[in-house]
Amino acid sequence: MKLLNFGSCNIDYVYLLDHIVAPGETEATDSMHIYSGGKGLNQSIAAARAGAKVYHAGCIGEDGEFLAALLAEDGVDLSYLGRVKEKNGHAIIQVTGTGENSIFLYPGSNAAVTKADIDATLSHFEKGDILLLQNEISGVPYLIERAYEKGMQVMLNPSPINDVIFQIDFHKLAYLILNEIEAEMITGASDPYGALEKLRQDYPALSVILTLGKRGSIYQDAKEQIHQPSFVVEAKDTTAAGDTFTGYFVAELVRGAKVKDALSLASCASAIAVSRNGAAPSIPMREEVLAMRPLLKERPGSIAAEMAVKTVESTVDAALATVTLKDIAAALGYSPVYTGALIKRLTGKSYKEYVLERRLCRAATLLRTTDMPVGEVIAAVGYENESYFRKRFVEKYGRKPLEYRKAK
Ligand code: RIB
């Protein structure tokens, strides 16, 4: 299986500011750097640094020859990279001290990709090969049509979103890798799970990778959903974080890795890129990612943790009086031992304390909102030892259950 990335190469002009310049505002900075960039180039370099053999196609301009040299240094195959007599594409990037960015794009040479270039390049690839695409070159819908006809697997990163994206037939994609904002623009759903559900209904055969920044990422195909937490790092520059993730993810797929492992490595590589300045220069090598992964901590509050907490909560609340650790473990798909440790890590409480806490809260609600006798309330929420339950109720609410009801 060959990997072709047909994508942009940009010259990134990066300015460090204390805030992103607002409309009508003028700011001066003495921090300016010129880096190699472009979503295409960044993703090719990420995939190459992740160990994949990558063919990069596209067009570079008269001032962009150094970009080709950089791709070649990373071992990217440039047999299908064209040259045009015009300015190379470039990006004006504002970065703040906290790693936030804002990008203005001039497409230049990236807009010079023709149908003839596409036909000529695709003639070297066949069924089963992967075509990776972003939305910074001309001819993206045509590329998708032709690649689909050949039976190639198309992975689209629909970034940046513009009218072109809405001309694409998503049924012809094998993978869609996008962030929360892009997902909302495509589906109209503002929450990640709503967007995933809409994509699942509309394109059941599509594998979707939704990246959520610090909250991690979610993979979804027809059979499963996998949650990947992000890793904790000190953010310097988030430029190319998504590109690093995409390049690593696709490279791991080509390597034959399981999706779960590909997500974890991609997430770690992306975290390392965020801790450094620049786009392509910030992308780590695979050995470094493998060495760093055991040392980096998963970020609490990630989507994976949020989901696990929701599952624990709903399983406990659905059968408050009778729930067991085994029930929660079954709902999460983990062993009871791991589940007990996970509950402790996510909630700060042991499994028993956590359930007791939920029972006390439900008992208080029932006392406030119903006329059920106290004994029945306590039986309804469940307890291991009634007098201990009553004691803990007093500790938590400062009154015995009956007095608590009277006081409300
Ligand atoms: O994704 C980051 C990239 O977006 C930058 O390198 C810039 O060139 C823009 O294309």
Image: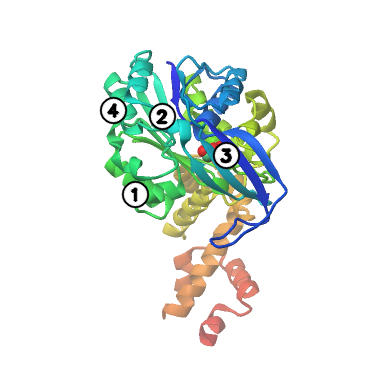
Q: Nearer the viewer, residue 218 or 339?
A: 218
**Residues tagged 2 and 4 counted as in contact (Cβ below 8 A):** no
Can you identify the residue that label 4 sits on?
145
Can you identify the residue that label 1 sits on?
187
Mark 3 crowdedness (10 Å alpha carbons): few <14, some 14-19, many ≥20: many
Distance between mark 3 and mark 1 Cα atoms: 23 Å
The numbered disc on residue 112 is: 2
**Residues tagged 1 and 4 counted as in contact (Cβ below 8 A):** no
Can you identify the residue that label 3 sits on?
241
Mark 3: which amino acid?
A: Ala
Residue 164 visible in the picture = yes
Q: Earlier in the sequence, mark 1 or mark 2?
A: 2
Q: Earlier in the sequence, mark 2 or mark 3?
A: 2
**Residue 114 rendering spot, x and y as whole percentages:** 35, 26
**Residue 356 rendering spot, x and y as whole percentages:** 57, 62
**Residue 184 rendering spot, x and y as whole percentages:** 39, 51
Mark 2: which amino acid?
A: Ala
Is disc 1 placed on a helix, strand or loop?
Answer: helix
Q: Nearer the viewer, residue 76 or 12?
A: 12
Mark 1: which amino acid?
A: Thr
